[in-house]
């Protein structure tokens, strides 16, 4: 992968939370703009200083702002605002204003829909799709929400769609309640399991929950088709040759199973796993643990231990990956890159490592 | 009441923080410490990748309550299992209950309904300390190794949001009990773990603020973990890249410590980055250091 070339147009940075995805996404964005491409970086949850560096304050929530960066191409950045994206989606697919208002005003939506499992992740790819369709950029780099495990991001859209598709909703969508809000006796004839379920929902879930959910999802019903088609289109985009994934992992052996699992799943889904970047790897230093004081010797020993341990982790990971999988270890920087110059330097370093590891193979 | 006594008197301690900051390690160290002082403690892990058992040197719990040491127990909890128990309780005919649980509709519902899993986790903690989940062992304190998804505050606020959105029925009842439990200033406490780096410190401060706004409460303790040691003043070898990296990483730590000194009122503990592989030895060393601060040299001895 060489971001100075035109391909791939879509780059999705994935990985568990706290491994440096956002910083790397920004660094690669600068590199891409430097090479002359009109580039958009869609970030999620950047640090305050990174926000400052990119110039994406509160105004950038859901909007694209130009980054003050002098380059042959251009760089825009946006902050994903899941609630805004969701609201916008509702507004777009609602057949009329009354439906829209009914959804947006439902207490269930207001309190809980923002926490629908995987909604953040879904909204992230949803935005990518929107931007892709508008074709205003040569390249879009998508940073992803800080999931617990990298795999959560991949599964989220499917989880949402199957939740929307599931019988739970069909039950919720049934006319459960008559005009007075009482459970309709009888209604449709239910089988044995259906009756058990009904009883369960009644007894355990409670009618109020059903009533609110039912109302919420009934209001949503006209949107479902649009929603489902959209989810399909998003999946197609991610599976197309235009989209590559950059998997970012933390150092340390504890993370290896996660990383491997994710890489395999991506491949199995037919998606394109680009390079795997192990970030913030402690460098190894020559020389022993001597020093002029006990404190210095202890410190040197700590650094030696960290260097060893991280190198061991990277080696172990490499041994487990298929030989054609590109893997680079990006060293821990002395300072956190928080201005554009430092970010660009980091992007160059990464690009350099990618190039040399590509020719190694 | 002094800090350690407060921690020890809690029925629920929620250990939270960004991914990878050392929540599981602190949960294990705190659990060992409380148990060693006669508080019957259950450390509860909500993570499909079980790893607390490794830190405590026992086989994986596989969902069961496992004895670790005198007064110390471990459980790995799948939130879905809690909802399953609820079904068993509310649907008294076993065969019917089983078929409900097997139906895909139910499974999707449990997986997808917002707030449900969080509510189930808190509900389980409450049932454990009130002896409803199991009668033996009788647990005094649950230390919850909170999942690092999203903002830590959601775990605490979800029961209340749920209770507000759903205004009657058994789920409302359960959510309300959970909400009361986490809001009770005598029952529940929050331990925030962070690294001395910008992002986790920022999140810790935001969490603190959210807690104050929504619950009118303060966290019991802030643990700043993984600190690089201070650079000794006589280690001045110019141009040594190791010393340069050490100096500058330590400076990042110090900047964040200064920020916490300024913006964080309340108890805090600092723990060093230790050159020990993950496992019981690391937990022992962390426990010792925690106790040295929380109990003073006298109590730790
Ligand atoms: N003070 C410390 N010194 C050295 N290593 C530490 C220290 N604290 C934690 N670790 C190590 O850091 C890694 C992450 O710790 P831990 O698993 O406790 O984090 P966590 O917050 O529970 O992570 P997750 O969010 O993935 O559950 C582990 O390998 C652990 O052994
Ligand atoms: Mg953990």
Image (cartoon, coloured by chain):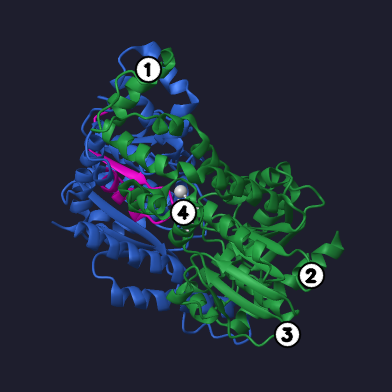
Label 2 vs label 4, nearer the camera: 4
Residue under numbered circle 4: A90
Label annotation for residue A196: 1
| Dot 3 or dot 4, earlier in sequence | 3
Task: Give the alpha-carbon distance from disc 2 to disc 1, as whole Å.
Answer: 58 Å
Q: Nearer the viewer, residue A169 or B128?
A: A169
| Dot 2 or dot 1, earlier in sequence | 2
Q: Report whether mark 3 lies on the same chain as mark 4.
A: yes
Q: Which residues are magenta?
A: B137-162
User: Which residue lies at the image location 52% right of the left edge and 55% below the top edge?
Assistant: A123
User: Which residue lies at the image location 68% right of the left edge and 52% below the top edge?
Assistant: A238
Label 3 vs label 4, nearer the camera: 4
Residue B191 seen by the camera: yes
Q: Nearer the viewer, residue B162 or B4?
A: B162
Task: Give the alpha-carbon distance from disc 1 to disc 4, as whole Å.
Answer: 34 Å
Label annotation for residue B23: none
Task: Give the alpha-carbon distance from disc 3 to disc 1, as whole Å.
Answer: 66 Å
The local crowd at label 1, few if under 14, some if 14 to 19, many if 20 or more residues have their Cα within 10 Å, is some
Look at chain B in the picture and name its colour: blue
Chain holding disc 2 = A
User: Which residue lies at the image location 40% right of the left edge and 75% below the top edge?
Assistant: B256
Quarter of the picture holding the N terminus of chain B: bottom left
| Dot 1 or dot 4, earlier in sequence | 4
């Amino acid at each position: 992968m060489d971001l100075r070339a035109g391909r791939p147009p879509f780059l999705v940075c994935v990985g568990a939370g706290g491994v440096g995805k956002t910083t790397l996404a920004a660094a690669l964005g600068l590199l891409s703009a430097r090479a002359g491409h009109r580039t958009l970086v869609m970030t999620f949850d950047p640090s305050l200083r990174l926000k400052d560096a990119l110039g994406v304050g509160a105004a950038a929530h859901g909007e694209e702002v130009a980054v003050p960066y002098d380059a042959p191409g251009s760089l825009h950045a946006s902050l994903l605002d899941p609630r805004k994206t969701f609201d916008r989606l509702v507004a777009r697919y609602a057949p009329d204003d009354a439906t829209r208002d009914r959804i947006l005003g439902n207490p269930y939506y207001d309190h809980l829909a923002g926490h629908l499992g995987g909604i953040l992740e879904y909204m992230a790819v949803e935005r990518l799709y929107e931007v892709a369709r508008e074709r205003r950029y040569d390249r879009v780099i998508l940073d992803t929400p800080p999931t617990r495990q990298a795999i959560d991001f991949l599964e989220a859209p499917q989880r949402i769609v199957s939740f929307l598709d599931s019988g739970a909703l069909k039950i919720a969508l049934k006319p459960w309640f008559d005009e007075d809000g009482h459970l309709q006796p009888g209604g449709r004839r239910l089988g044995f399991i259906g009756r058990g379920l009904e009883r369960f929902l009644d007894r355990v879930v409670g009618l109020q929950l059903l009533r609110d959910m039912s109302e919420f999802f009934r209001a949503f019903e006209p949107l479902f088709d649009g929603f489902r088609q959209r989810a399909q289109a998003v999946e197609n985009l991610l599976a197309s040759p235009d989209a590559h994934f950059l998997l970012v992992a933390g150092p340390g052996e504890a993370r290896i199973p996660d990383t491997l699992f994710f890489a395999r799943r991506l491949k199995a889904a037919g998606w394109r796993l680009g390079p795997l970047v192990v970030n913030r790897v402690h460098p190894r230093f020559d020389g022993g643990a001597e020093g002029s004081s006990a404190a210095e010797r202890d410190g040197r020993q700590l650094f030696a231990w960290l260097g060893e341990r991280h190198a061991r982790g990277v080696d172990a990971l490499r041994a487990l990956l298929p030989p054609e999988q590109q893997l680079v270890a990006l060293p821990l920087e002395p300072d956190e890159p928080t201005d554009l110059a430092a970010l660009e330097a980091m992007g160059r370093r990464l690009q350099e490592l990618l190039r040399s590891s590509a020719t190694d193979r | 009441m002094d800090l350690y006594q407060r921690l020890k008197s809690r029925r629920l301690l929620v250990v939270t923080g960004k991914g990878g900051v050392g929540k599981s390690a602190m949960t294990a160290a705190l659990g060992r410490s409380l148990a060693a002082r006669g508080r019957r403690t259950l450390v509860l892990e909500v993570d499909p990748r079980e790893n607390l058992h490794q830190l405590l040197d026992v086989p994986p719990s596989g969902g069961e309550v496992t004895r670790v040491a005198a007064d110390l127990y471990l459980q790995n909890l799948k939130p879905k299992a809690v909802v399953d128990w609820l079904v068993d309780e509310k649907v008294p005919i076993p065969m019917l209950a089983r078929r409900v649980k097997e139906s895909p509709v139910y499974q999707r519902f449990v997986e997808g309904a917002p707030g449900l899993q969080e509510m189930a986790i808190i509900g389980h903690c409450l049932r454990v300390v009130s002896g409803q989940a199991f009668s033996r062992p009788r647990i005094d304190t649950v230390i919850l190794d909170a999942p690092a998804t999203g903002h830590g505050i959601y775990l605490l606020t979800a029961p209340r949001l749920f209770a507000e959105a759903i205004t009657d029925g058994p789920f409302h009842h359960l959510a309300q009990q959970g909400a009361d439990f986490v809001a009770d200033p005598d029952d529940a406490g929050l331990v925030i773990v962070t690294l001395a780096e910008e992002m986790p410190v920022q999140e810790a401060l935001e969490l603190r603020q959210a807690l104050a706004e929504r619950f009118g409460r303060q966290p019991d303790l802030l643990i700043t973990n993984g600190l690089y040691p201070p650079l000794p003043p006589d280690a001045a070898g110019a141009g040594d890249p190791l010393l340069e990296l050490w100096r500058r990483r330590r400076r990042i730590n110090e900047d964040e410590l200064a920020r916490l000194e300024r913006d964080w009122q309340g108890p805090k503990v600092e723990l060093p980055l230790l050159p020990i592989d993950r496992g019981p030895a690391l937990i022992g060393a962390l426990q010792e250091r925690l106790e040295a601060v929380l109990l003073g040299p006298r109590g730790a001895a």
